[in-house]
Image (cartoon, rainbow, N blue to C red):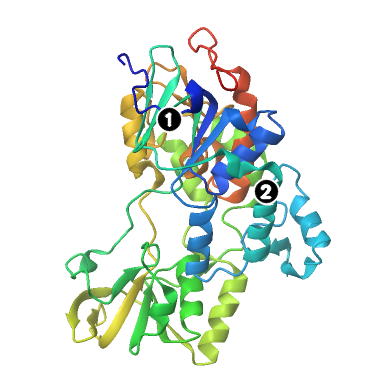
Amino acid sequence: MSDGEPDGDYISPANQSYEYVIVGGGVHGTCVANYLLDEGGYDHEELCLVDPHERLLGSFETKARKCGMRTLRSTFVHHIDTEPFSLDSFAEGAHREHELVPTEDYPNRPTLDLFLDHARYVIDRRDIDACHHQSTVTDVTRTRHGLLRVDTPVGSLVARRVVLAVGLGGQLTVPSWATSLSDNARLAHVWDDDFDPTTAAAFDGRTFVVGGGITAAQLACRLSEDADVTLLSRHDFEVELTEADSRWINWRHIEQEIHSLPPGSAARCDRIRAARHDATIPPYIEHRLVDARDCGDLDVRHGEIECARASGDGLHLRFDDGTTATDAQVVLATGHDSAPKHPLVGALAESLSLERGANGFPVLDDRTLAWQRSDGTDSALYVSGALAEMSVGPFARNVVGARRAAERLLDSRDSVDSKAVAPPSRGRS
């Protein structure tokens, strides 16, 4: 069919159009789906959550376990459910209050297992799995009737609104010295799909974990339980309990400090960057590092690798102070590209003529998180997660940011231009 209408590969059941297609089944996408089902009053037939993993939250759980996360940095009131004390009640009902970890000058934090088990409880209670379509999104375009066509490798979906909740950028950050090494060199990135911390810990030589933030610190502590590990950072570790001052959780503070600046402006980016405690570790992770170092399980070193070459079964490394190491392996914990560099962001901006601001961030309606078109009007594409940072503030990518975004999306339901968008069919035709 022409004019952007679905063709023979259209996969919505019985020509059904969805109210929402959510792109991404991590913490943000699942939280948004739960809010729409619970407080939004939508039916499961009206939502579709597109994610390539077999289980919702699958990528989050895999990454958390890979890097050795034991507890969340977020507090017990930050989770995917709509009721703030839902996780606390879940822990009490399961006799798992001991998994709410006391933290000095801060509310209790859940263990990773408790957070994930509670999330699965919410997913099962709301039957969010019924909305899960296991696939990836390649593009979103407008149909001739003003709806949105969501393309996947196996066909297309049609929706009245789309929520983009895709996380950080698609490319891993790799230092220049590592780019010339062969694929079979003893080099890995913690977020490589095939990275296995168990295999890495079995290496006979010394393991260098490269990075200066919480992921590198947690990973080094985990690997040091079974291997000789050196944590290599370019700078001293900076200790901060949270990713930003707690004032940034308050929406009124966000309005005063962020929304008062021009949308999409460099001034917004600068204020958010100044507020966010990037590349920091919380005190309890610092204590783990100190304990591992004092026990002789872990070395902590400041500096950089200047060059590396494959040698025998390991790597020969030269550092910026002139020293060397042989028969080594390196595991990078150096992060991803920034969220606006995610390949889907550029594709959607071009397909739907959407406005991008400083550093490539989407220009959003601050009240609804609708991505604005180049002509200044709101599109029917909404954003959650790191991509919403310019409106949600320094906690945008965190669990509390998911809750804030979900609340904004509920407010957006009446903001879609009814003259431009034809109502989708409800249920099967």
Q: Is residue 85 visible?
A: yes
Along the line of sight, the residue nearer the viewer: 125 or 66: 125
Mark 1 belongs to which amino acid? Ile
Residue denoted by label 1 = 11
- Please state if 245 lies on the left or on the right of 61 as rendered: right
Q: Quadrant of residue 305?
A: bottom left
- Tell me the tag on residue 408: none
The residues bearing labels 2 and 1 have C-alpha atoms spaced at a distance of 25 Å
Residue at horizontal 72 percent and vertical 57 percent from the top? 76
**Nearer to us in this view, 180 or 1:** 1
Residue at the disc numbered 2: 124
Q: Residue at x 45, y 18 (%)?
A: 147
Q: Is residue 244 left or right of residue 216?
A: right
Describe the element under mark 1 as helix, strand or loop.
Answer: loop
Which residue corresponds to the image point at 22% horizontal and 73% vertical from the top-left?
Answer: 184
107 on left or right of 216:
right
Tell me if residue 5 comes above or below residue 405 in the rendering: above
Counting from the top left corner in percent of width and height, residue 423 is at 55, 13
Residue 243 higher or lower than 257, as above or below = below
